[in-house]
Amino acid sequence: MSGPKLDLLREGLAQLKIPFTEQQLKKVQVFLEELERWNRRYGFVARSDPSHREVDRRQLIIRHVLDSLAAWSTIRAFENRNQVADVGSGAGFPGIPLAVFLPDSRFTLLEPSAKKSAFLRNAAILAGLRNVEVLETRLEDVGRRFDLVVFRAFSPLSRASLAELQRVLEPNGAIVAYKGKLARIEEELAACGLDARNRDIVAVPVPFLDEQRHLVIVPRNLSAS
């Protein structure tokens, strides 16, 4: 990854105020190149133009890498974030980009698909991400606890999914859910019985993307009503 695409990533990181090194940029490059190879066969990430064989690298950087990193400052601010779980990691978003730029946290990528788990392990090894572990399992079968649980495309929030997410949290842990439009978020939270007393909604800008993005933060020690 070089030229305009690398400049796009650099500018996006600057807009998000994320400090970075050339080594970190190389890790992202290796990850994306491996994703593109696997994507040709398995279609982990949808192509913007179905007539093209390759996924558009610009959209991959904006809609997946920078979108994942929009939560960087929020997650970095948590006092307890030694162990972070990315639930339903899929093609590695948001877990792998966050792991690159939060090297002092350990990320466990939970992914039930054997093909996606194989890809995630391979990509983490090639990119030299020693702070990444992949578990080929469903959330319901996880017997460990984490300081933070993040997810981007796991499922709409419901009472059942919220209970499972909170089950794998440490006592002072929190859920950080990536969401889109505010109106849809309010519908999901109402269905869970969550109101302003027991969750936070944070608007986050994604560089070069003119769409609403929000984070929903739910502490474990505050349950749904």
Image: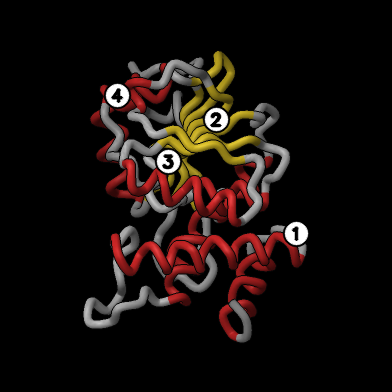
User: Picture coordinates of residue 107 (x, y %)?
Assistant: 57, 37
Q: Residues within 10 Å of mark 3 (few under 14, many from 20)?
A: many
Is residue 182 depicted above or below 217 in this figure?
A: below
Q: Crowding near pointer 4: few (<14 within 10 Å), some, many (20+)?
A: few
Q: Position of residue 97 (x, y in %)?
A: 57, 54
**How far apart are the two marked residues, 1 and 4, measured between alpha carbons?**
38 Å
Front in this rendered view, residue 7 or 136: 136
Above or below for 104 versus 56: above
Number of other residues with Cα within 10 Å of mark 2, as a class: few under 14, some 14 to 19, many 20 or more: many
Numbered label attached to residue 193: 4
| Front position in the image: 55 or 113 | 113
State the residue at coordinates (69%, 67%). 14
Amino acid bearing label 1: Pro
Amino acid, disc 2: Leu
State the SS at label 1.
loop
Q: Position of residue 165 (x, y in %)?
A: 39, 25
Three-letter amino acid code at the position of disc 4: Gly
Q: Looking at the image, is 7 positioned above or below residue 32?
A: below
Q: How far apart are labels 3 and 1 at the CA level? A: 23 Å
Q: Which residue lies furthest to the bottom in this view?
A: 3
Identified at 46% across, 29% down, the residue is 218
Whether residue 20 sits left or right of residue 47 in the image: it is right
In this figure, which residue is indicated by the disc labeled 3? Answer: 151
What residue is drawn where x is 34% and y is 54%?
181
Residue linked to disc 1: 19
Quadrant that contains the C terminus:
top left
Q: How far apart are marks 4 and 3 (CA)?
A: 20 Å
